[in-house]
Amino acid sequence: MQDLVSNTPTLDKVSTESPKEIAALRIWGRQPLSGNLPVSGAKNSALALMAGALLCPESCRLRNVPNLADIERMTQVLAALGVKLDRQGDALTMDASHLTTSQAPYELVSKLRASFFAIGSLVARLGTARVPLPGGCAIGARPVDLHVRGLQALGAHVRIEHGIVHVDVPGAGGKLKGAKIYLDYPSVGATETLMMAATLAEGETIIENAAQEPEVADLANFCRAMGAKIRGAGTNNITIVGVPKLHTADYSVIPDRIEAGTFLVMAAMTQSDLTISPIIPEHLTPVIAKLEEIGAKIVQDSPACLRVIPHALKATDIETLPYPGFPTDMQAQFTSLLSVCEGNSIITETVFENRMRHVAELVRMGADIRLKGSTAIIKGVHRLSGAPVMATDLRASAALVTAGLAAEGQTIVKGLHHMDRGYDDLEQKLRNIGAKIERFTEREVTKE
């Protein structure tokens, strides 16, 4: 499923130049930082819960919903399906009582991978769905074959034509049937899609080798609040007993463990005494363990608050793995951190094969990093230097902002559309703890 683009030049194509306005972030590094960094609701959880709301023929409310570009795109997808939405602050009310179509629009799904997960809810509710193959960050192959095979096991007919996944459930009423499903890989998206599909299926469904991420458990808890019968979410074996119908619920999204982890890394890298809250400590176990191994001192001030105390840092090795292993979404941030830790570190990315593009940008700032495939070999340097850099994906943007806060001089970070997808009001949060940071717009000449 790769688009083939010819590199052969054509004679009739004339190159022109035009100005384009792009947003960038200017960071003055090595400012004294102190105070509290508030953690917003989990992006990846909120997106899944929004897809889950399609299962309910009544109105549902989600609280602690972050204000992000990805959330806005998901609201547009739901609205296109006929859902009525109302947002008041961090509360989002969704009324899916009258779905007007089972076909999600390509122009929206192509920009947001998580919107593809609505396919499970649509098939469960309507017995049919038409959803384009998904888009999102270009961090590697994330095929939907696990979703497809799982839906087929539940009795659906699935075909992919012209980039659209067509799903239909045969028979009167279009009801899915419970089944035993083994996932070749513990994919979060496939686990969530199939769990949602199974909530309204006839009989019992068992998902083996399921993803164990906290966001999966949060989705299960939301579905349970609507009346679903799910047990085992958060383990590698989830059992769902289908129910005829779900009901209204009022539910709060969990704190974002990746945002919290990013803030912990920022505190350690800038040698700042910061508190981070609200958090769920057990969601951050691998991140905290690695920070303590590096030498950071982390204190739990309260059940939902962590404090980072400045301390000398040393090298370590990291390998990304599915939860409860070290999260791939924290790899880029730790690459920044380890670039200024004393000694030699090795980071191995095993989840996504194209998630090391931030390394070249860190090298521009003075980091000593060599890449060998999906492995980064890092020799710690005393200090990074500010430079113009480009964010290549969501977590790379956080890594570069973190590096800019710790670097000597001024750093310009471009590619902010990535950051805006996953970090709610990051600049203001950082300004509140003393960072000198500003967003600005510059004109860039592009060839067309």
Image: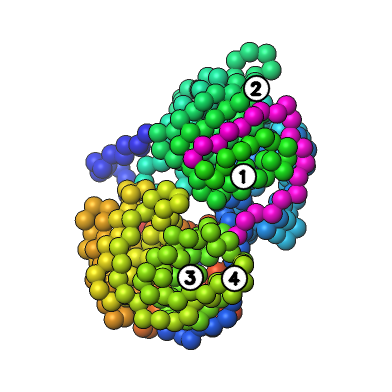
Can residue 97 be seen by looking at this rendering?
A: yes
Real-space Cα distance between discs 3 and 1?
25 Å
Q: Residues within 10 Å of mark 3 (few under 14, many from 20)?
A: many
Residue located beneath label 1 in the image: 219
Residue at position x 66%, y 28% in the image:
242
Callout 4–callout 3 Cβ contact below 8 Å: no
**Helix, strand or loop for disc 1:** helix
Magenta-colored span? 236-255
Of badges 4 and 1, the one in the foreground is 4
Callout 3–callout 2 Cβ contact below 8 Å: no
Q: Amino acid at mark 2?
A: Glu
Residue at position x 39%, y 65% in the image:
290
Residue located beneath label 3 in the image: 264
Real-space Cα distance between discs 3 and 2?
45 Å
In terms of depth relative to the viewer, which is nearer, 312 or 445? 312
**Mark closest to the chain's N terminus, 4 or 3:** 3
Determine whether, in the image, residue 141 is placed left or right of residue 434: left
Residue located beneath label 2 in the image: 202
Residue located beneath label 4 in the image: 305
Can residue 38 be seen by looking at this rendering?
A: no
In terms of depth relative to the viewer, which is nearer, 187 or 372? 187
**Helix, strand or loop for disc 3:** helix
Residue at position x 63%, y 13% in the image:
171
**Residue 13: percent from the left, percent from the top?**
32, 45
Real-space Cα distance between discs 4 and 1?
23 Å
* Picture quarter with the N terminus: top left
Q: Main secondary structure of the magenta part?
A: loop
Q: Amino acid at mark 4?
A: Cys
Q: Amino acid at mark 1?
A: Leu
